[in-house]
Image (spheres, rainbow, N blue to C red):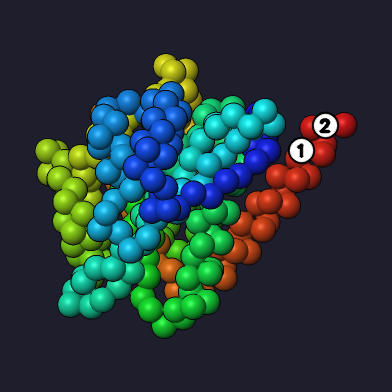
Amino acid sequence: MQKVSFLETIDPATLSQEGLADFFRKLYGIHCQIFSGVSRALFEQKMFPLNAQWTKIRIFKNSKGEDVGYSALHAYEKVINSENIVIFRVETGILRDYRRQGNASSFFLTEAIKYKAVHPFKKSYLFCTLVHPSSYHLISTFFFRFYPNFRYATPSNVLDSMDQMADAFHEVRSSNGDPSLREVGWVTRQTVKEKSEWAGSNDPDTCFFLEKNPDYHKGIGLMTLVPLDMRNIFMTTLLFLCYLGKNLIYRRVENK
């Protein structure tokens, strides 16, 4: 595992047209090492959606200052079930050797805490359409409450809200008829060995994801919802701090 040494947060709205084009050209080069199935035009639309209230993009760099990944966070105001809510969406891609360090999670969690501090009573959610079991495993690891959850059934009203959210973002339903699956098109590049390792995993969250979304390697995404209420954010923060502590101990032992 290689270490992410530097972080840079970009607000694309502050860049000139020339600067924005150069920024996305470099970022798309990193993206194509991680995903297939996405044109540059679609990538730019997803990374800098004009209908979002705001967008922040965190760039991850190695010790040489080279870009090794990104995490884009967007906030949207939507009306779901006749209620005004805020929906956060994330696109993340990190080169294989720089993963499993909690960088993308810490970025989102920090921004979520900052938002709730300013808007404590505003209903807000993280809504994702996950195209790889690693993403669902990440949410299962760090978030206290989320849907669908391998531990318990999803309430019908939550399923209805998720369906409305996906429709609000014009995500097309999968042809297999399962309303929880959407045609995303982003395909994670993985070796035959990596795919086999995921298929043979005994982790309950991974097994759940693969059962729900066996065609993820075709760019099919599983709708996933995280309520961002104060209790969930507090418990998630504790889980994340525990993860960081375990990771620090592991690194020290590994370096001895």
Tell me the residue at 37%/38% (across/down): 18
Residue 163's place in the image compared with 63, above or below, is below
Mark 2–mark 1 distance (CA, rounded to whole Å): 6 Å
* Towards the viewer: 136 or 126: 126
Q: Are marks 2 and 1 in contact (CB under 8 Å)?
A: yes
* Towards the viewer: 119 or 50: 50
Disc 1 designates what residue? 251
Mark 2, other Cα within 10 Å: few <14 / some 14–19 / many ≥20: few
Residue 73's place in the image compared with 17, above or below, is below
Tell me the residue at 27%/54% (across/down): 50
Disc 2 designates what residue? 255
Furthest-right residue in view? 256
Total marks placed:
2
Mark 1, other Cα within 10 Å: few <14 / some 14–19 / many ≥20: few
Tell me the residue at 42%/47% (across/down): 15
In the rendered image, residue 220, in percent from the top left (x then y), is placed at 25, 37
| Secondary structure at numbered mark 2 | helix
Residue 253's place in the image compared with 148, above or below, is above
In the image, taking residue 28 as reference, residue 246 lies left or right, namely right
Amino acid tagged 1: Arg
In the rendered image, residue 163, in percent from the top left (x then y), is placed at 19, 59
* Towards the viewer: 124 or 175: 124
The reply to whether residue 181 is visible in this rendering is yes
| Secondary structure at numbered mark 1 | helix
Amino acid tagged 2: Asn
Residue 256 lies in quadrant: top right
Quarter of the figure with the N terminus: top right
Tell me the residue at 31%/37% (across/down): 43
In the rendered image, residue 116, in percent from the top left (x then y), is placed at 48, 74
